[in-house]
Amino acid sequence: MQIFIDSASVGEIVKWLEMGVIDGVTTNPTIMFEDGVYDIEAGVRTISALVDPLPTCVEVTTDEPDDMVVQARLFASWAPNVVIKVPHITTDGVPCYGIIRELETEGIKVNATAAMSLGQVILAAKAGATYISLFAGRVSDEGGNAPEVIRMAVEWLGRWRFKSKVIVGSIRSVGDVLNAVMAGAHIVTIPPPFLNKMADHKYSRETVKQFLSDAEKALRLMQQAMRTG
Ligand code: E4P
């Protein structure tokens, strides 16, 4: 199983990359905006160079299918490890699977993004998407059973030997991460605050504090004994 970081913050990406914890990066226009990355090209060039050869997912910023293809080719030309996020459907309800197929046929890797259902996963896999992003938090927002959708998607992809990997995104808690992992997600993309929360535990800190304090006491006793002895 892999972990991606759901962030455009260079500081966070470097921090978690250097710890050997992450296998790739996902972004979207909202994340870029919130992380202060207004120049997409500069941001993507920086991030993709940092994580190379790991994948950097960047999303098209147009709702027009023909423009998506043009934009995808441009974004993909910035670095060999750029993966293009293409939505399953436009805001007008036009399915984007033809775009996914065209790009993958050209050798451009696609992350079919903002999936909320097994049906969308099936169609994106048929179209040849390298990654399919299932938005667990948003599925739950609508009252859906996100772990069940993840489990069914991963099982179906495996049964028919599709190459597509499910990236579970839209993580809202550490519980979401663990549910995705236990449901068999190939990849979970985690925002930095939840990576920190996963590492942290009050009792771990207290335990380490106790060990350090006892080590200090032992050292003091030993030094005392050496002085008197
Ligand atoms: C994943 O690739 C997306 O960037 C992200 O997880 C979307 O999550 P949201 O529901 O917080 O917008």
Image (spheres, grey):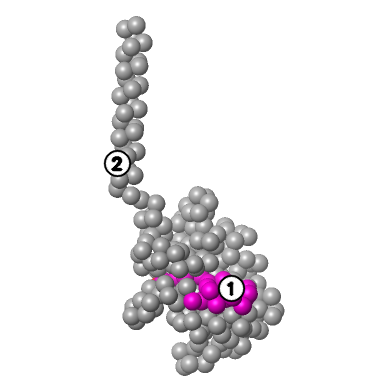
Which residue lies under the disc numbered 2? 206
Vertical placement of residue 14 versus 186, above or below: above
SS label for mark 2 = helix
x and y, in percent, of residue 205 in the image: 32, 43
Residue drawn at x 34%, y 32% as measured from the top left? 212
Vertical placement of residue 196 versus 80, above or below: above
Q: Nearer the viewer, residue 149 or 17?
A: 149
The number of callouts visible is: 2
Residue drawn at x 46%, y 74% as measured from the top left? 150
Per the rendered image, the range of residues in magenta is 152-170
Q: Nearer the viewer, residue 219 or 25?
A: 219
Mark 2 closeness class: few <14, some 14–19, many ≥20 residues within 10 Å: few
Extreme residue toward the front, this view: 159
SS label for mark 1 = helix
Vertical placement of residue 227 versus 196, above or below: above
Extreme residue toward the top, this view: 229
* Comes first in the chain, label 2 or label 1: 1
Question: Mark 2 belongs to which amino acid?
Answer: Glu
Question: Mark 1 belongs to which amino acid?
Answer: Gly
x and y, in percent, of residue 37 in the image: 46, 67
* For the residues bearing labels 2 and 1, Cβ distance under 8 angstroms: no
Which residue lies under the disc numbered 1? 158
